[in-house]
Amino acid sequence: MSRTATLAPPVVAPDRTFELSFCLTRGVARRHESGYTLARLRFSIVLAPEAIEDLRSLKANLRTEVRQALEEHLRHQPRKVSKSRIKRLRGLSKPQYRLRVGEVRVFYDVTSDTVEVLAIVAKSEAESWLAQFGKAE
């Protein structure tokens, strides 16, 4: 015998997501705050032609890592600076940010709803790339 319950949708604050669990044996509804934002802006990721060439030149396993990192870190919060993963580049107007993926560095700019990946370079070549292509403020 299966018991089903119909519940009214929970009232959700605009900046929080809540999970509603319902215990059928006790008939008690519980609300759990998850702490995640209900709806986050989804950025589109655009690769510059040079970045496409850089990505194609990587080994397959490293290319997969970079693609996963782009999706994971840049799709929803590309401006979220961390201690080691994402850095805001000081003194430069272009590129604005650097994403670290293992021994590879991804340089990118962020506009209102777009992330433009400018280059994907090895860690050893990152400084020379910035000296050649970086634009000072």
Image: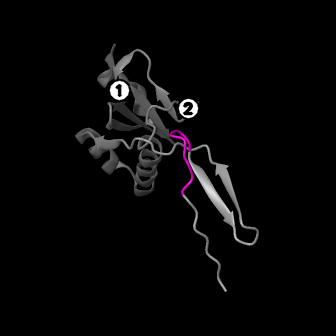
Give the tally of numbered discs.
2
Q: Is residue 19 left or right of residue 128?
A: right
Q: CA distance from mark 1 to mark 2?
A: 17 Å
Image quarter in which the C terminus is found: top left
Q: Position of residue 15 (x, y in %)?
A: 53, 39
Frontmost residue, 37 versus 73: 37
* Vertical position of residue 135 compared to residue 40: above or below: above
Q: Residue at x 70, y 71 (%)?
A: 24
Q: Which residue is mark 1?
A: 95
Query: Does the magenta run of residues contain 10?
Result: yes
Q: Residue at x 75, y 72 (%)?
A: 25
How many C-alpha atoms fall within 10 Å of the one at disc 2: few (<14), some, or many (≥20)?
Answer: few
At label 1, the amino acid type is Pro
Frontmost residue, 28 versus 60: 28
Report the span colored magenta.
9-16
Q: Is residue 35 left or right of residue 53?
A: right
Query: Does the magenta run of residues contain 65?
Result: no
Frontmost residue, 57 versus 17: 17
Disc 2, SS? loop
How many C-alpha atoms fall within 10 Å of the one at disc 1: few (<14), some, or many (≥20)?
Answer: many
Image quarter of residue 7: bottom right
Whichever of callouts 1 and 2 sits on the residue coming sooner in the sequence is: 2
Asked if marks 1 and 2 touch (Cβ < 8 Å), the reply is: no
Q: Which residue is mark 2?
A: 82
